[in-house]
Image (cartoon, grey):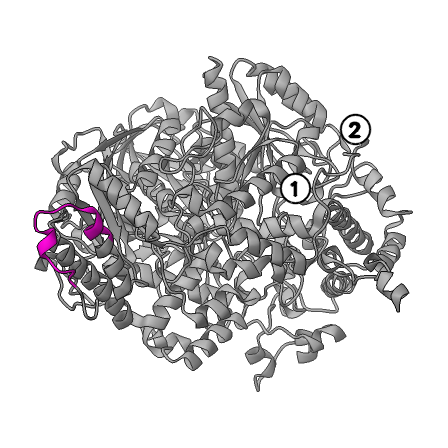
Amino acid sequence: MAELLQAPVTSIAREPGFAARHIGPSPAEQTEMLAVVGAASVEALLDEAIPAAIRRRDPLPLPPAEREHDYLARLWTVASKNQVFRTFIGLGYYDTITPAAILRNVFENPGWYTPYTPYQAEIAQGRLESLLNFQTTVKDLTAMDVANASLLDEATAAAEGMALAHRVCPRKDAHVFLADRAAFPQTLELLAARTEPLGLQLRVVDVASAEIGPDVFGVLLQSPDANGLVRDLSALIARVHEAKSLAVVATDLLACALITPPGEMGADVVVGSAQRLGVPLGYGGPHAAFFATRDAYVRQMPGRLIGVSVDAHGKTAYRMAIATREQHIRREKATSNICTAQALLANIAAFYAVYHGPDGLAAIAGRVHGQAVALEARLALLGVTQRNAAYFDTLCMDVGHVAAVARIRQAADAARLNFRYEGTHVGIALDETVEVRDLDAIVQVFRSSVRSSTDEGVALPTTSTGAAAELKLPPVLVRTSPFLTHPVFHTYRSESALMRYIRGLERKDIGLDTSMIPLGSCTMKLNAAAEMLPLSWPELARLHPFVPAAQAAGYHQLFGELESALGHISGLPGVSLQPNSGAQGELAGLLVIQAWHRDRGDGRRNIALIPQSAHGTNPASAAMAGMEVVVVACDDKGNIDVVDLERKARQHADRLAALLVTYPSTHGVFEDAIQDICHIVHAHGGQVYMDGANMNAQVGLTSPALIGADVCHINLHKTFAIPHGGGGPGMGPICVAAHLAPYLPGHPVVKTGGAKAIHAVSAAPWGSASILAISYGYISMLGRDGLRDATAIAILNANYVKARLEPHFPILYTRTTGRVAHEMIVDLRPLKAASGIDETDVAKRLMDYGFHAPTVSFPVAGTLMIEPTESEPKAELDRFCDALIAVRAEIQAVIDGTADKTDNVLKHAPHTADAVTADAWTHPYSRQQAAFPLPFVRARKVWPTVARIDNARGDRQLICACPPMSEYE
Amino acid sequence: MYPADLKYTKDHEWVRAGDGEAIIGITHYAQAQLGDVVFVELPAVGRAIKQGEAFGTIESVKAVSELYAPVSGEVTAVNDALSTSPESVNKDPHGAWIIKVKPSNAGEIGSLLDAAAYQALVG
């Protein structure tokens, strides 16, 4: 017994850690796969896939892996350092109640958070319908003609509104944008960030008294504004229109349920945030911003727009409309670099509208307003003046003296309340979580700090309900028009009905909870439950981004450790967590490079070299940064043409600002010449920006610094496990070399960035802060060795898929060793020439097998790009390969003439249950061939709910709100 | 395939030159490359355009392209029917005109390709 007690605890073997769960293939399977690949070991494979000159040989200087349970326990202690005060700061961020049914069934549900952007519409009808509900919610509340499917944040939406105004303003020489002084500070900051590189001029003025001259193309107004003032903007907007200028109005969706919306005041563009419709604060995000406009400008809208079309059987079907605009096709001619939306958060807001309906939203808005009215009355008894002539939920208390503000602040801090302090004013923004006790606490703070002659005589006033029905608004500001009249906002009000509606939509879509999503360039890896779980914790979810840093100590510890880890992984020590997407990271990185050049007296450097094979956002971001794009050719092996690069670098030597390069290349290959390429750019005075889209092939094995890059962004939603959310959120932090660190983005409200910080690129100081915890968890639980192993197995999985597919399809690009990196391009063009079956047919046919298609026609038209990631087990890789090989045989049947050229399983794909079970079956192939082409399909059949969608029809006649109920039959 | 009475540009526009008027559209080759046309963005009547300059955009399900002016002049008419049936560009590319221009430099027409030269260009 005594001996037993003395036995060392460490001798007890523990079950495998997180890495073994995150990485798909077991060690035994890895051995089998290596045999197929023809490599002696994983290390031998890596040596063949990655040039020796750029290999990282030392281990990542990171802590070892933490077990899931231990990580969660530790994160809890970190999160507990955040203090959740009652917060009334406002400025676009408000506490909200996420209905539990939405929290559990959407926010915490992999069926909603793991799918990709709905490019394959036939297996995305669920979230497309929900996003259409979002568009309808925004369109109705703002009283505009059309709304998009969300943008990154409100400030970005305002900047995009400005850009639209500039494009459509009939006076082509107009270059001035007026922004109202009382707009949110983060919005004004982003407008400054966007105008400067484009040669536009931002003037921050009091628009009501400003002249709108012939050089003004647009005006930003905000109501309710930063102070909470609500105004009738009709006359002001009429004046803007007389000047042949456009009116962009920032507003609040909840206020629009009560107050005359901007659309009824003549606005051309309406923007704002849908955060307070049930989306947690999360210390700044992620949230869905909205963008609404007039029909006349619909084709000028940035971002994604969901539209209605029909499928091959004439049934109503949803799809992303006019998706070819912007950076996918227009590249350096693009007028926006916006790529990502905030689909998951837009869906939460949409379900919030479905849950509450118009009467529920009006009741919430009425209650919040009523509480503000009651609070104003009570504070008035203390002799404090409220400055807003009309308001929705935000009071602007003028306490007369900064000393009084300081006393209030001290008392508020002691009572754990946050207000907005601005000069002699105290701003108090209420929200739907506010209870009578909160009003009592606020009054108590003022009572204890404001010395009023009447103070002693007045008993503490009380409010019985806090829900005064009184509206304190002039009649012109009271909304009278109906909204959310569509049945969807009336039908699912019981939780049973709502739960089934949510589940019914979810069932129509393929996410990672269904099957692997082999999208090249998208890195659809596991989003582990332990990484996701903490996002619902109030300590992470309920923090306003502008609270004093001391209240967010847990977040700041997490940011510090994450920045350090990303710095080690990239080899670039300066990190900004601010950019909200890869494309915003590109813009931020390019602006940092410009600022550095300028600081060195080299401001003329303005040319960006971009290889032909680059992501479309690269040239679009360069254009947004005001750079001139020079395209560099690729050779027939898909590599950058070094001779062409050198020629162009030399030709533009005095103006070269940067090269944008993706590594491994967008063709899925570790290019051998990468160090030479970076050296050439440096030798001609440029900086190297590395697009981190393919970082999943680098972590622990090489790094941006090792290849010679100065700046990179890291798509946390690819390599570092943030889920794609069905089309957002994303995060694109940037890592920079030490010489560029002083220029990292700042923020107007909270200090971030370096000593010579460029303007902010996101509304919130740390972007979508809450989801940084996912990447933090990923890094913590994989640890030093697991991170490297994940990369190694991502490369093994890709080369295994390549080895299995190679006998059946040409694989377009490899290294000279025959190895690919973490993804590969399957060339379908020869088959198309022989059979008439094209890449779209193959993509749609894979749905019948239960798979989401690989990336179609990027970066090479007529091809598929496959990225399996490390998370897929061998059995799933085999099912996917079996499916593609079976499709190859189906194509062969067309070539051989044993299948019809047009009436075949491919051209009619995908097959719906309706089609397969119809009484009439006229095709020359069987129903079994249509629906169950391989044995494994039967056990996990996915039925696409619509057949092939007519894209042209949907783009010709844009319908972008919920269609009438008869269409749902 | 390419009517002899039209002139062509390397950017795949065609011009029908008449009495003080030039009618402009896009070629069969261009529409085939674009695929299903879904939208044509037209300039304002009265706008002055310069040879080689973009005067509008044409959008298909797979691409967005600029429309380049084959000749300089003032836009005298735009084909409004394209706003409701952009697909006519696919169905009848050499009939579905996009804009009419009053040319300001008659010599420019002579610099354009004839049908044979254009056919040779697109193969």
**Does residue A327 appear to the left or right of A28 in the view shown?**
left
What is the distance, in whole Å, between disc 1 and disc 2 at their CAs? 18 Å
Q: Amino acid at mark 1?
A: Met
**Quadrant occupied by the C terminus of chain A:** bottom left
For this orientation, the residue located farthest to the front is A2
| The one of A708 and A406 positioned closer to us in this rendering | A406
User: Magenta part of the protein: which range?
Assistant: A445-461
Q: Quadrant of residue A569?
A: top right
Instruction: Specify the label residue A53 is tagged with.
Output: 2
**Does residue A408 appear to the left or right of A513 in the view shown?**
left
Q: Which element is circle 2 on?
A: helix
Label 1 close to label 2 by CB (< 8 Å): no
Chain of the residue under label 2:
A
Badge 1: residue crowd in 10 Å (few <14, some 14–19, many ≥20): many
User: From where the camera sits, is residue A969 visible?
Assistant: no
Q: Quadrant of residue A463?
A: bottom left
Q: Position of residue A872 (x, y in %)?
A: 72, 59
Instruction: Specify the label residue A695 is tagged with.
Output: 1
| The one of A341 and A120 positioned closer to us in this rendering | A341
A716 in magenta: no
Q: Earlier in the sequence, mark 1 or mark 2?
A: 2
Q: Position of residue A41 (x, y in %)?
A: 88, 47
Chain of the residue under label 1:
A
Instruction: Specify the label residue A218 is tagged with.
Output: none
User: From where the camera sits, is residue A315 visible?
Assistant: yes
A460 in magenta: yes
Q: Amino acid at mark 2?
A: Ala
